[in-house]
């Protein structure tokens, strides 16, 4: 019996790549294993956006050494973003000789062929293209969730924010054809999915590399027309490319949810410039204002980084001030981490770790207060919740998401998975809302 276990690190894009890897493995006769120990192949789909992500992979590879000794037939593979970095594959094979296969982000479609090579080779099989050679369509995909499905619309990134490794490991931006995306979504709806999440490092630049004049707004309009599809989400947006046409398109489309994830990264114009983000704090705050006036009750979330090289006390105050003004519903906060090969790695004035820690703690405290206040504002409102299943946190409760993407819990003993119900919000915590069901809509 051939069985697989995939461990995924990093962003949704990587999570979705793992669904494609699983689909390919199942197509050649593998079944999902219940645990690492039970698998005949273990794949680590890696992330290198911060060092912490890489360290997790190294420690897992260390632990797998024993499993390989006990079971020499076990196949251990490393794929995803880490191997795309220069010399990383050599580093991995040097430290972990029990790894059988290493392949990059541009080589995932070759997995079945690579496994044949592993079967006939005593050495680690490596296949890492430095750039993409086209888009591969039509792979079998094994999705986990039955309510929400991820659909890639663009691969790669052209932005080269100076701190970021992603453009180096994912290659240049490539858009899938609108027809390919719409037919995939129509197929998912036929399978019973209610919500799709369109994925790309910068979804707003969708279509720029296509010969036709399709753009992100036209893609949303096209998907809105698919019968049976209830909700459309997308991530990630770039504040520089989120234009008025897109705001008014989104405001006019019922299925596109009122959730805007707009990574700001920093609140100081000086730092934003050094990051090569292509916008100012004034532009960003103006954008949020426009979104809130065109799309009432929208949920606005962000990514923020502290400790970028050269960030001084005033720059950090600008970030805190922007957070107070923007009043994000929630934020992912990060300590800047040097990524070898990126322009920021060579910048002077790297911020001491202790300063970075103080800043992130202050930022998290502030954002937590705001997140709770924003959730308190939701109490008393009736919201449409797409039910995902039973709550693991609270027995007897179901959980789902409102249109803004916040998690909502409510008591029910009915099987409402995949249904949209109206819930009146009665309580909240920082990370979720709770309420009582008012009516079942679908
Ligand atoms: N394409 C998306 C996501 C990129 S990675 C975007 O443009 O927002 C997700 C987040 O990781 C980024 O938004 C950024 O806040 C953070 N990040 C990227 N590189 C980092 C680094 N070197 N150190 C710390 N955080 C980083
Ligand atoms: Fe990285 Fe910037 Fe591209 Fe996002 S937009 S993936 S932060 S380079
Ligand atoms: Fe990480 Fe690669 Fe995503 S570096 S954040 S898994 S694109």
Image (cartoon, rainbow, N blue to C red):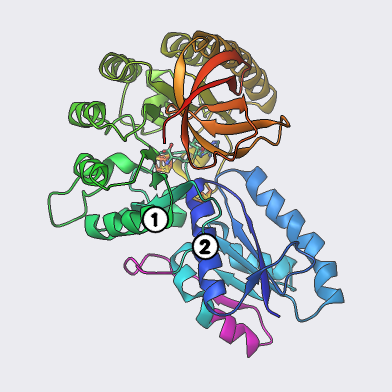
What x and y, as percent, mark residue 292?
A: 32, 16
Point out the image quarter for the N terminus.
Answer: bottom right
Residue shown at 21% from the left, 28% from the top: 252
**Label 2, on which residue?**
142
**Which label sits in the foreground, 2 or 1?**
1
Dividing the picture into quadrants, the one containing residue 220 is top left
User: Residue sitting at 75 percent across and 73 percent down?
Assistant: 98
Residue 165 shows in this picture: no
- Label 1 packing within 10 angstroms: few (<14), some (14-19), many (20+): many
Which is nearer the eye, 19 or 236?
Answer: 19
Q: Could you say which disc has been placed on residue 188 in the image?
A: 1
Residue at 29%, 59% in the rendered image: 183
- Residue 319 picture location, percent across and down: 48, 16
Residue 138 picture quarter: bottom left
**In the image, residue 418 above or below residue 409:** below
Going from N to C along the chain, the mark reached first, 2 or 1, is 2
Query: How far separated are the C-alphas under marks 2 and 1?
Result: 12 Å
What is the secondary structure assignment of the residue under circle 2? loop
The region drawn magenta spans 114-139
Residue 82 sits above or below residue 332 on the image: below
User: Mark 1: which secondary structure?
Assistant: helix
Q: Is residue 4 left or right of residue 313?
A: right
């Amino acid at each position: 019996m051939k069985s697989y276990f995939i461990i995924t690190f990093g962003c949704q894009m990587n999570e979705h790549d793992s669904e494609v890897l699983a689909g390919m493995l199942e197509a050649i006769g593998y079944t999902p294993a219940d645990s690492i120990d039970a698998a005949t192949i273990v794949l680590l789909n890696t992330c290198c956006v911060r060092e912490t992500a890489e360290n997790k992979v190294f420690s897992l590879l260390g632990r797998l050494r024993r499993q390989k000794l006990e079971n020499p037939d076990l196949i251990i593979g490393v794929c995803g973003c880490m191997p795309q970095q220069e010399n990383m594959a050599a580093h991995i094979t040097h430290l972990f000789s029990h790894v059988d296969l290493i392949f990059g982000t541009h080589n995932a479609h070759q997995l079945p062929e690579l496994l044949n090579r592993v079967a006939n080779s005593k050495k680690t099989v490596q296949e890492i293209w430095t750039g993409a050679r086209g888009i591969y369509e039509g792979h079998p995909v094994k999705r986990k969730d039955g309510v929400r499905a991820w659909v890639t619309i663009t691969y790669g990134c052209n932005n080269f924010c100076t701190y970021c490794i992603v453009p180096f490991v994912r290659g240049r931006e490539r858009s899938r054809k609108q027809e390919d995306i719409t037919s995939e979504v129509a197929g998912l709806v036929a399978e019973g999915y209610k919500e799709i999440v369109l994925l790309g490092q910068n979804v707003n630049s969708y279509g720029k590399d296509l010969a036709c004049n399709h753009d992100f707004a036209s893609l949303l309009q096209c998907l809105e027309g698919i019968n049976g599809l209830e909700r459309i989400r997308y991530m990630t947006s770039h504040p520089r490319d989120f234009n008025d046409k897109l705001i008014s398109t989104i405001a006019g489309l019922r299925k596109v949810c009122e959730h805007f994830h707009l990574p700001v990264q920093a609140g100081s114009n000086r730092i934003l410039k050094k990051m090569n983000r292509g916008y100012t704090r004034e532009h960003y705050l103006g954008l949020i204002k426009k979104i809130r006036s065109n799309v009432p009750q929208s949920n606005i979330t962000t990514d923020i980084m502290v400790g970028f090289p050269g960030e001084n006390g005033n720059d950090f105050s600008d970030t805190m001030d922007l957070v107070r003004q923007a009043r994000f519903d929630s934020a992912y906060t990060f300590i800047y981490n040097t990524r070898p090969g990126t322009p920021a790695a060579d910048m002077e004035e790297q911020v001491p770790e202790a300063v970075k820690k103080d800043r992130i703690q202050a930022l998290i405290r502030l954002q937590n207060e705001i997140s709770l206040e924003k959730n308190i504002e939701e109490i008393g409102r009736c919201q449409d919740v797409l039910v995902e299943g039973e709550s693991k946190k609270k027995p007897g409760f179901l959980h789902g998401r409102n249109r803004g993407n916040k998690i909502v819990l409510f008591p029910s003993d009915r099987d409402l998975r995949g249904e949209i119900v109206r819930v009146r919000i009665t309580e909240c915590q920082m990370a979720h809302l709770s309420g009582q069901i008012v009516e079942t809509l679908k």
